[in-house]
Structure formats: C-alpha cells, structure tokens
Amino acid sequence: MPPTPASGLPADWSVDERCMNCDAARQLAPELIEERAGRSALVRPPKDEAETRSLLAAAHACPTRSIRPGTGALTRDTDPFPLTLDEGVLLLGHNSRRTAGASSYLCRRPTGWLMIDTPRFSEGLAARYEALGPVTDVLLTHGDHAAHGRAWADRLGARLTVHEGDLDAAPDADRVLRGADPLDLGPGAVAHPFPGHTRGSVLYVLDERHCFTGDSLYWSRTTGDIEVHESLTWYSIEEQAASLARSLDRLRFEWLLPGHGDRRRMPAEEVRRRLRALAERCGELRPSPVDFTAVRW
C-alpha cells in the first residue's frame, strides 16, 4: 500500500497526457518527476511531507494542470506560491500555456516590486501580489512571453516594458527599450539587450546579483552548465553568439533565473568563467530547424 503523505493528501498522484514538456514540474520536484517519452512522468508518489510540498509546487506551477492528486482537487491552501528563492526574489508559479509554460518572478525594489515575465492572469493571483505592496513595472524578457503583459500591467497599475525588437508582441507597451547597449532602469537595475532567441530578447540584472534571462540562457541539468536554447532560436543563433560575446565584460551576477530551463546560484566568478566557455561553444553553432524536443533540459 502506497504511503499517505503527512499532509493527508492521497498518494495516488498522476500526470495526464496534456503535459507540454515545459520542464517546470521537473525543476520543482526532481526527485519525483522525470522526462519520459517527451513529457513529464511521475516516478513514485511522495513519501513524506517535504516531498508532498514539492509535488504540490509542481502541480500549481504546471501550465496544463496535468499533475493531480487522486482527489483531482488543487486548492488555495495547498498552493505555495509566491515561493521565496532569495531575499526579495519570488518565483510566481502558475505558469501559462500562452507563454509555453515559462517561469515568472517578482523582485522587491526600493520603490516597489518588479514583475519579470508573467504567470497566467487571474484576479486571485493579483490580490496576492497586491498584498505584498505596489508592483511598479512588468518587464518582458521577449515577445513570446508577452501574452499576459498588458493585462497584468493594467490590473496592477504598473508600467509595461518591452524591447523595440519585439514590439509587435506588445505594441501598447508603456516603455520601449531601444538599441543594443545596456540601459539603466533605476538604482541597481540594468537591462541588457540580447538579440538571438528573438530580435528583442533582454536580460534584466538587479544589483549584479540576480539575472533574469528569459529564454536566452538557462542552467541545463543534462550538461551541468549554462546553455543557450540552440534548438529554440527563433531569430538568429549567430546574433545570440554575438550578444553573448558583447556582454561578457558587462554581465556580473550570481543567480541565473530563466523563463525556461533550470535556475542556478553560483559565485560571480564561476558565472563569468562559464559564460566565457559558453561564448566559445556558441560561436561555433549554426542555424538549425526549431525543435522543442531537442532541448537539453
């Protein structure tokens, strides 16, 4: 008989066929969920309260709501989000199908919170974020994470920001970043235009500590290193390599916080070393067809 978690939730969890293989669940419950045949699959039920919490986080993050306890119900009182990653940095969960299941974040700044990319939109989530304090800005890392940007900005009374290269995805943005040089967004906040994945991709670096990379850079559990999504480059892999080379002497951070792919904290000097090695690898890449199944998660 399978164990019953300490929380009282049933142990007979499942992952249904709607899974879009976005990797969000495997990041949050790596000991319980793995990739099989192009989607997430449950390895075993949770054996204790800590594992139940990690599986609940995976379930509430899943954009297709494919991960379910035996009861089928996911309730507010089992939802751990927003989830603290570091002081002043929250993972929002509730990933959206309309952003291909991308992760999003809230970051506390002296004047309020910044939302970087967005979760699915709902009034219930908005009330949670409002309770934390004012959200002043919604920063989009690139166009294919823009689906809910305007709705969130309007609901929270925030300013919506996008780079001109992806303005077609958010034509009603309140602030448009231009050019290829780093842009000061306020004390300790810098936008680094990073064309490659899309024409208007941007990295947002806060206090030389946290780097929000969208789909430009991520930590791969497969390779154990920082990687680019070479099989998901919509604009230009050559431009991505150029962006990386151009940014090597400008980027300094400790936390790699992507939209897709795993998060990772490292000493800043290790980040610098890994980025230099990545720049060499990336410089040798050539265009290839977009293939979501080829991502090395």
Image (cartoon, helix red, strand yellow):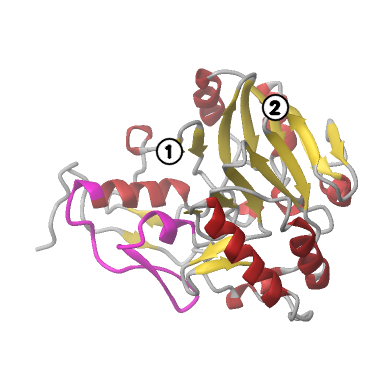
Q: Residue at x 70, y 75 (%)?
A: 280
Residue 48 magenta-highlighted: yes
Q: Mark 2 falls on what kind of element? A: loop
Q: Where does residue 79 sit, x and y in percent of width and height?
A: 38, 38
Residue positioned 38% across, 33% down in the render: 76
Q: Which residue is mark 1?
A: 83
Q: Is residue 234 visible?
A: no
Residue position for label 2: 187
Q: Could you tell whether 36 is left or right of 152 in the image?
A: left
Dot 1: element: strand
The reply to whether dot 2 and dot 1 touch (C-beta < 8 Å) is no
Q: Is residue 51 left or right of residue 73?
A: left
Count residues near mark 2 (Cα–Cα under 10 Å), then give few for <14, some for 14-19, many for 20+.
few
Instruction: State the image quarter where residue 153 is shown.
Output: top right
Q: Which mark is nearer the camera, 2 or 1?
A: 2
Judging depth in this view, the residue of 133 and 109 nearest the camera is 109
**Image coordinates for residue 34, horizontal then vertical, percent:** 38, 69
Residue type at mark 2 is Pro
Q: Of residues 183 and 159, which is closer to you in this image?
A: 183
Name the residue type under label 1: Leu
Using residue 44 as the reference point, say whether residue 68 is left or right of it: right
Magenta residues? 24-50
Relative to 100, 3 lies left or right: left
Magenta span has 242?
no
Based on the displayed image, in which of its 4 quarters is residue 217 positioned?
bottom right
Height in image: 261 above or below 119?
A: below
Task: Give the crowd class for mark 1: few <14, some 14-19, many >=20 residues within 10 Å.
Answer: some
Quadrant in which residue 136 is drawn: top right
Image quarter where the N terminus lies is bottom left
Mark 2–mark 1 Cα distance, whole angstroms, equals 25 Å
Horizontal and vertical percent position of residue 15: 38, 62
- For this rendering, which residue is in front, 168 or 262? 262
